[in-house]
Image: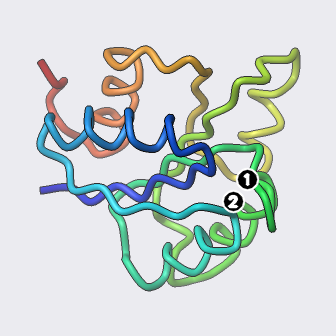
Amino acid sequence: MARILLVEDNEMNRDMLSRRLERRGYLVVMALDGGQGVAMATSEAPDLILMDMSLPVLDGWEATRRIKSDERTKSIPIIALTAHAMSGDREKALEAGCDDYDIKPIELPRLLAKIDALLGKEPSR
């Protein structure tokens, strides 16, 4: 069972996404801000991280940079999640070290396809 670290400060988004991922067979652990996300990337050793970009304490851009600069966590795939789909945001997320990018509101089939691709799995049904 793949372990996903969901770094999301919005309780409604966290609840909805974690329940939907758990129904698909993923084990979901959650961080409420970027600082906690960086710490949990090390302590939880997730298979993949879903990183909101607009976070308190440490934004998703900086949290991603820190995770990717640490030898212990640099190989964990990170998907940036943002409601701010501005021109250049995808490039900014990739430059920060994210492996992929998705916009909110989340379309689960699209996100699952990205998760499956990064985990090297057959597509979820």
| Rendered residue at 40%/54% (across/down) | 48
- At 27% across and 60% down in the image, what residue appears? 3
Q: Which residue is mark 1?
A: 60
Is 77 located above or below residue 101 in the figure?
Answer: below
Q: Amino acid at mark 2?
A: Thr
Q: Position of residue 123 (x, y in %)?
A: 19, 24
- Going by the numbered disc 1, the residue's amino acid type is Gly
Q: Nearer the viewer, residue 33 or 90?
A: 33
Spot occupied by residue 41 in the image (x, y as percentages of width and height): 50, 73
* Disc 2: which residue: 64
User: Looking at the image, is 45 positioned above or below residue 31?
Assistant: below
Answer with the quarter of the image where residue 85 lies: top right
Q: Which mark is residue 41?
A: none
Whole-percent x, y for residue 98 in the image: 64, 46
Colour scheme of the rendered structure: rainbow
Q: Quadrant of the N terminus?
A: bottom left
Asked which secondary structure carries label 1, the reply is: helix
Q: Quadrant of residue 110?
A: top left
Residue ID at (37%, 77%): 44
The residue drawn where x is 14% and y is 36% is 23
